[in-house]
Image (cartoon, grey):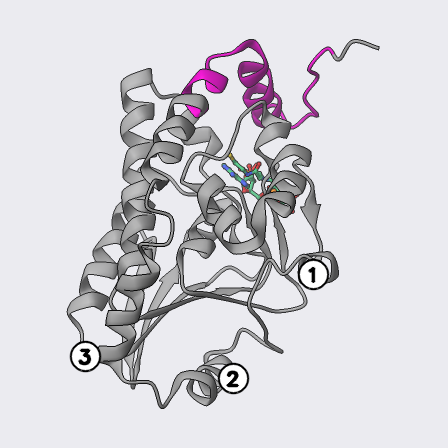
């Protein structure tokens, strides 16, 4: 079986390449575990920049793996969500600059992962959104706090409460990503990163990131409520219907009263 994550050092860069293209890099437990291993390697490497990329041309990540979590018991579901949060916290707290390179779908858990990086680079092919409400669910990997931190409450509500998938132009208007790049080729975006951050002192970056991490000191309260809510939704009638509809490749029906 092929590895779901490859990583390699290339000059100043530590590249983490996601390779679960058959399901658009949907995040199951094994993929999250492999990402964490790569992050640990990145932390101890001499590289200055960490980039998270996809080897699949259609998507960065299409979200949490619905097929995987649909089969979990409550305790295992809790462990899965908590582990995802841990991996994303690791991305955020890495002492180096971390970039998500988005070139395609960046949805749900994939968007939450991208938001954990310091910066999101996006091509014009990118699409962003939190489709969870269409499944009768809510974001569960710290998406609430991270999208609020990045874009404010109003944009967070537009995204999370509509479940819409936004194209590049709309995402740009709402400032869902940090930099537009022409291509997701390493040669191209690595030059761009060096042009922006090449002169920064690694020690000063590490110390600055420690300060930024304190901006929302009460975030664990929201994150705990989010986990509890995800599980509540998952076991509700609407959550059951939404997940079943995805697996049966049909639109969900939530019996909306007219
Ligand atoms: N979890 C599990 N499998 C997923 C997935 C996810 N989040 N997203 C995509 N896949 C799988 C599909 O089931 C399909 O597998 P199959 O070929 O075995 O049926 C494969 O990836 C390709 O996706 P497909 O839906 O055929 O591609 P598309 O171009 O028609 O649509 C998306 C792309 C991203 C719009 C669509 O896959 C989608 O809506 N995914 C779910 C997004 C989501 O709700 N994320 C939040 C999860 S909480």
Q: Does 23 sit above or below residue 173?
A: above
Q: Is residue 24 visible?
A: no
Marks 2 and 1 sit apart, C-alpha to C-alpha, by 19 Å
Q: Reading the chain from its start, which is encountered first: label 2 or label 1?
A: 1
Q: Does 38 sit above or below residue 254?
A: below
Q: Position of residue 252 (x, y in %)?
A: 67, 21
Front one among 79 and 258: 258
Front one among 1 and 217: 217
Splitting the image into four quadrants, where does ligand 1 fall?
top right
List the residue tagged with mark 3.
Answer: 46
List the residue tagged with mark 2.
Answer: 188
Residue 181 sits in quarter: bottom right
Marks 1 and 3 sit apart, C-alpha to C-alpha, by 34 Å
Quarter placement of the C terminus: top right
Q: Are marks 1 and 3 in contact (CB under 8 Å)?
A: no
For the record, the magenta segment spans 230-255
Q: Secondary structure at mark 3?
A: loop
Answer whether residue 237 is magenta in the image.
yes
Answer whether residue 86 is magenta in the image.
no
For marks 2 and 3, give the one nearer the viewer. 3
Q: Does 80 sit above or below residue 254?
A: below
10 Å crowding of disc 1: few (<14), some (14-19), many (20+): many
Disc ID at residue 168: 1
Residue 248 appears left or right of 2 = right
Residue 170 sits in quarter: bottom right
Marks 2 and 3 sit apart, C-alpha to C-alpha, by 22 Å
């Amino acid at each position: 079986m092929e590895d779901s994550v490859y990583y390699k050092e290339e000059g100043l860069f530590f590249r983490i390449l996601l390779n679960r293209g058959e399901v658009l890099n949907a995040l199951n437990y094994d993929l999250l575990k492999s990402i964490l291993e790569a992050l640990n390697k990145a932390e101890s490497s001499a590289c200055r920049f960490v980039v998270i990329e996809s080897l699949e041309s259609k998507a960065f990540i299409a979200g949490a793996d619905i097929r995987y979590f649909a089969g979990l018991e409550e305790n295992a579901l809790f462990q899965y969500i908590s582990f995802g949060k841990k991996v994303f916290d690791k991305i955020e707290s890495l002492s180096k600059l971390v970039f998500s390179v988005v070139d395609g779908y960046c949805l749900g858990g994939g968007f939450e992962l991208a938001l954990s990086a310091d910066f999101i680079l996006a091509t014009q092919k990118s699409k962003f959104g939190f489709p969870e409400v269409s499944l009768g669910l809510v974001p569960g990997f710290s998406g609430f706090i991270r999208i609020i931190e990045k874009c404010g409450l109003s944009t967070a509500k537009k995204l999370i409460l509509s479940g819409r998938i936004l194209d590049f132009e709309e995402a740009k208007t709402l400032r869902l990503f940090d930099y537009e790049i022409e291509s997701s080729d390493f040669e191209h975006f690595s030059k761009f990163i060096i042009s922006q951050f090449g002169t920064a002192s690694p020690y000063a970056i590490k110390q600055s990131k420690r300060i930024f991490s304190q901006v929302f000191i009460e975030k664990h309260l929201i994150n705990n409520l989010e986990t509890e809510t995800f599980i509540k939704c998952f076991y509700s009638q609407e959550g059951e219907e939404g997940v079943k509809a995805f697996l049966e490749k049909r639109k969900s029906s939530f019996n909306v009263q007219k």
